[in-house]
Structures are given as C-alpha cells and as structure tokens.
Image (cartoon, rainbow, N blue to C red):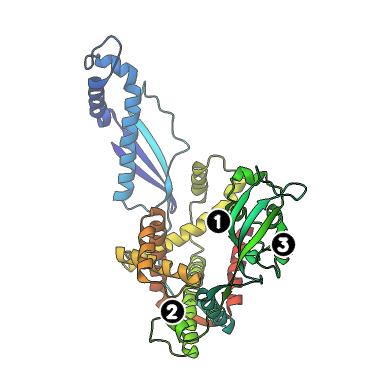
Amino acid sequence: MNISRKDIDANNAVLTINIEKNDYSDIVEKQLRDYRKKAKVPGFRPGMVPVGMLKKMYGKSILAEQINKLLTDTLYNYIDDNKINILGNPLPSENQTELDFDLQEDFEFSFDLGIAPDIKIEFSKNDKVPYYNIEVAKTAIDNVVHSYQMRYGLNKNVDFYSDGDMLQGNLFELDADGKMLEDNGIQVQHAKFYPKYTFKNDADAQKLFDGKKVGESVIFNPKQSIENKQELISLLNISSEQFENLTADFQFVIELITHMEDAQINQELFDKVFDKETIKTEEEFREKIRENIKANYVRDSDYKFSIDMREFLIKKYENLTFPEEFLKRWLKTRKETITDEEIDVEYPKLIKNVTWQLIQNQIVEENNIEVTEDDIKAEARKIGRAQFIRYGIYDIENEVIDNYVNDMLKRDDYVREMVSRIYQDKVIAAVRPQIKIENKKISLDNFNKFFEEMVNSELND
C-alpha cells in the first residue's frame, strides 16, 4: 500500500492511496471462510458450500466492504500520524476514476483535504474589550422585597373579590338559552383560578368579578377569555378534542374568595428569607438583596463580556485564509438539498464558527487548559442556582441544588453544553489579563437593549 500527498496550496491538499491485491486478499479470504461456516444455501449443509460459489455470490460485496474499511483506517491514521489539522471531512476527489470490483485487483483512491490555517495568538496594548457593570436600581430591590412579602404572606378568606384574589367555585356549561346542561354538559366542582392571571389578556372578563361575593355567580366564555390552551384544558378538565369543539358559555358560582395579604417587613420576614441572626434591620435586608441582585448581574455581565471577547478575537483574526471551494463542497455533503444561494448564506457563518474554534483550540493548547469533573459539577451548580434566582429565589437550600445538579448530569446533551461553556470561560479567563478591559457603568434597561439588538441582528442575517 502506498500513500502520497500533494499540496495544492496552504489550505488544500490531495491524498492518493494505492491499495494492491496483497493488501486485502488474506482478509477477504478469511471473511469468505468465516461466512462459509454459517452460510445457508439450499442444497448444501452448513459449512459445505463451495468457496467458489460463495465468492461468486458474495465476493464482490465482501471485497468492497473490506477495501472500504482498509481505506478508511489508512486515511484517518495518516491524518492523525502526520498531525494534519483538517476542516470538515476528507472528500473523494472530483477526478476519482470509477472502480470495477469485477475486473480490478489494484485500486487507487484520491481524497481532497481542506487544511486549517496556522494561527498564532498574540496581543498588543491596543487590544481592548468593554466590560459592563450593571447598576442595581432601587426599583429592582423594591420588586424583590415585594416578592418576598407575597411569598411569605398570609392567605385569608374574604367576603368580596378584589383584584389579585383567588377564587374557588363550581363551573357549569350552559346551553344556547343560558341554562345549565345537566346531563352532557361539562361540570367542574371546586375549580380554582386567579381572574387577574387566568384572564390576563381579557380586561372585560376580569371586570366581571369585581366586587363579587361568595354565593354570587359570573357567566363568561372560557374559549374566548382564556388565551392559554393548556390552562383552559386544565381548568375544565377536558381533552384536546373537547377543547377544539368548545364554544359554550360557563357559569361560575363562587364558594370561596382567598386574599393574599403581604407579609410585614420585620424580623420574622428577615429570618424566613435569610439565616436567622444575620439580618436585623430593613436597611440590612435591602442591602443583602442588593448584593444578591448584583451577583446575578455579574453573571449577565460576564456572559456579555464572553460574547464581546469572542467577537473581538474573531475580528482580530478575520484575515485567516480558508479552502472556500472545498468547504462549500463539504456543506453540500451535509445537506444534499441545499442550494448554491443557501451555501453563500451559510458559508460566512461557518467561517466565523471555524475561526473561533481554531482560536479557542490554540489558546487551550498554549495554556494547557483542561475541564475536570469538578469543573462540570461546579458549572451545573452555578446554572442551577442562577435559574432559581431568576425566579426570585435567592435562599435555595443546598440539597435542592444538589438534586438539580444530579438531574442535569444525567443528560448527555447538557453535559456537552457545559463542557463547551467551561472551555470557553477558561479561554476567556486566559486572555483577559493580556488585554485592556474598559469598565463601563450601565442601567439594566440599556444593558438588555444589547441583547435585543443582538437577537434582531441574528434574525436579519
């Protein structure tokens, strides 16, 4: 077997592999003997089928299978042994001659390789990336304080409904004349809902409940007033098919009105939200909340910084050369139905991602960066805690976080995403001391506009 390499330019090469009969004959013969032991051919006992007959029946497919295996192993072993940094996958050369397994004993295969450009990571004093410090507004603290007041508030039964109260009662489907359908109609006993939220997109439906008291009733059309399909199905305890056919009005007879009274801002609330004996005054309470919000903002700032750093590095090395024709051919192999116009749209995105991967790989290699099991667990805990914080829960117990982490680590797709994110974070941490960081203060609203603009830009690309 002979392998030769011809460099077309810095980004393109052709590998030619010559396979001769003595490279595969022994393997093919062994496969035929093994197949003879178990082949079932009418008129012959197992193991007694003539080898010549088997070769005529199956020889070509066995030969093609073994040559393909030998070819694949040889190709990729050569690439690995010679440390060729390829892009995509090797592609059969367009001038590859057609093979004839009936007449040929020796075979020649040619593969086009797309080779990644060499990259050298260097920085100068002019390299700089902004870091946005999000300011904690008083309204943000007020909102969290109120969420705790609601969370630890007291439920009490009241006589009259007011906005935000929960109602419990009995629902009855009505006929066209407004009379209750007793036999075939939908009836729900002790149904519970919050008009303010259940009818959040129907102000007129919400007003129907204003000032109502226990024992009184309200008539409304759930299909028209409740926008959330699943919420409606759950409230009426019906099937999806019933939902599609639903048109009737319903009568709701109130049997209970529950009002949530906010908890007082006092020592009892401080102790419930944070560890006892740590918070003594409302000022300390609000400061602790500010710190928690700030910690959450830091995660958002770091995320924005990672995006900006990635874009900065990609732009810094935007003049790298790539095997454009090869990569466009490779894109076609990934999706046969893709058009040339679609490839022209996809190609710049591919180059951007490949550039980042090359930069990242080089920094990982130069800094001996690794991702450990402890890194993955720590990342999972960070993600879990951030998720609860987004729901306004800052005092989550470690046991709850541990359960959340264990569930995440069971998902291979989550683990792959976390490993990728950890590598990126470590790469950015390695670069950060080598460039100038421009610290900028910004409001949360203006910070969020960055992401709105980024999403809009991606949609337009």
**Distance between the alpha carbons at the discs numbered 3 and 2:** 37 Å
Image quarter (top left, top right, bottom left or bottom right) of the N terminus? top left
Q: Which class describes the residues within 10 Å of circle 3: few (<14), some (14-19), or many (20+)?
A: many
The residue at 53%/39% (across/down) is 336
Residue where numbered disc 2 is placed: 272
The residue at 32%/16% (across/down) is 56
Give the number of callouts.
3
Q: Is 54 above or below relative to 184?
A: above
Residue in front for this viewpoint, 388 or 434: 388
Q: Position of residue 312 (x, y in %)?
A: 50, 70
Q: Is mark 3 on a helix, strand or loop?
A: helix
Kind of residue at disc 3: Ala
Residue in front for this viewpoint, 52 or 393: 393
Q: Where is residue 350 in the image (x, y as percent from the top left)?
A: 51, 54
Q: Which of disc 1 and disc 2 is earlier in sequence?
A: 2
Q: Is residue 349 visible?
A: yes
Q: Which of disc 3 and disc 1 is earlier in sequence?
A: 3
Q: Which of marks 1 and 3 is in front?
A: 3
**Distance between the alpha carbons at the discs numbered 2 and 1:** 54 Å
Q: Where is residue 340 in the image (x, y as percent from the top left)?
A: 60, 45
Kind of residue at disc 2: Lys
Q: What element carries label 2?
A: helix
Image quadrant in which you'd find residue 30: top left
Q: Where is residue 323 in the image (x, y as percent from the top left)?
A: 48, 51
Q: Nearer the viewer, mark 2 or mark 1?
A: 2
The numbered mark at residue 205 is 3
Residue in front for this viewpoint, 124 or 45: 45
Furthest residue in direction top, as rendered:
43
Q: Is residue 105 visible?
A: no
Furthest residue in direction front, as rendered:
215
